[in-house]
Amino acid sequence: MPVPFQNLWPRNLGPRNLWPPNKWPPNLWLPKLNQLFSLVLPQTCPLCQSFVKGTGLCPNCWQGLRPISAPHCQACGRPLAYAVLHSVCAPCLINPFNASPIRSSYCYDEASKGLILPFKHADRLDIAPTMATMMAPHFKALAAEADLVIPVPLHRTRFLKRRYNQSAELARWLVMQTKIEIDFAPHFLVRVKATPSMAGLSKDKREHNVRHAFRLAAPASKPLIADKHILLVDDVMTTGATINSCAQTLLAAGAGRVSALVFARVV
């Protein structure tokens, strides 16, 4: 009986990707190159560029961030002013998300934008390891129960313009940093609908824009996600319409359960 190719992936080469065995995953050399640079060049804060000991943000930049901690909704992760019955917020009781639980590490505000926007729009891929470290506690808790990590995909036109998928970069660094034994599948889900920028749109308009926007990359992927717990990774959650649409697609394809992790969410 042939051994599944994902079990043949050398563990010392980073996270296992569900790629064909004759394809070499891209960007595999970047972590090693970063390690080499860290020996030669001093570490700096990715926001203000001041020198720091180790990696991550400097104390001044840390102070502006608002982490999301308990009490929060156990379903969508929305921060709550006080603990409520069953720890589920009213919107989730009325209209629950297709993905649950959803966890967010930080509130989306001016401080978190200082990390997200350069990483997303200015080729600041060097920020990804720092953001992944900040997401790691939630990732460890969610990945412990999941079978597969799938980043929210970009449409091909936006990918060609940006040249990388920021959600895939976060997911890749999370798997590598935490060293959790979980499969990383960056190409299982594709975005087939080129949605316009949704900044400033209402929840209803966002849901309309992403309706039928995602599908499995290939029918052959269905057996690999059947009855599996899928963990989605994204950078920002505004209304949750994108995560909801991705989760709906995965559940319709046979996934058993979908949860999600984002760096920051609008509150």
Image (tube, rainbow, N blue to C red):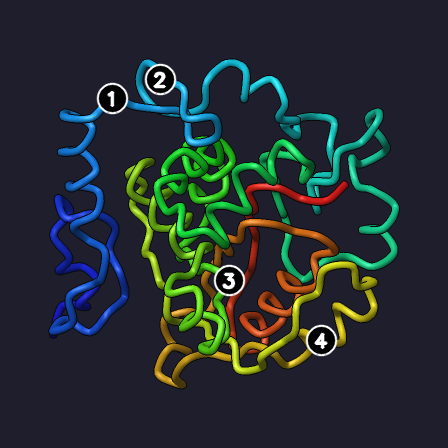
Marks 4 and 3: which is nearer the front? 4
- Which secondary structure lies at badge 3? loop
- Residue 87, percent from left and from top: 78, 35
Mark closest to the chain's N terminus, 1 or 3: 1
**Is 83 left, or right, of 225 in this rendering?**
right
Q: Amino acid at mark 4?
A: Asn
**Is 8 left, or right, of 66 in this rendering?**
left
Q: Are marks 4 and 3 in contact (CB under 8 Å)?
A: no
The dot on residue 178 is none
Quarter occupied by residue 201: bottom right
- Which secondary structure lies at badge 1? loop
Q: CA distance from mark 1 to mark 4?
A: 44 Å
Q: CA distance from mark 4 to mark 2?
A: 43 Å
Which residue has dot 2 on it?
51
The dot on residue 152 is 3
Residue for point 57% across, 53% down: 259
Mark closest to the chain's N terminus, 4 or 2: 2
Q: Nearer the viewer, residue 138 or 93?
A: 138
Which residue has dot 4 on it?
209
Above/below status of 206 relative to 145 = below
Mark closest to the chain's N terminus, 2 or 1: 1
The dot on residue 42 is 1
Residue for point 40% across, 19% down: 50
- Residue 230, percent from left and from top: 48, 58
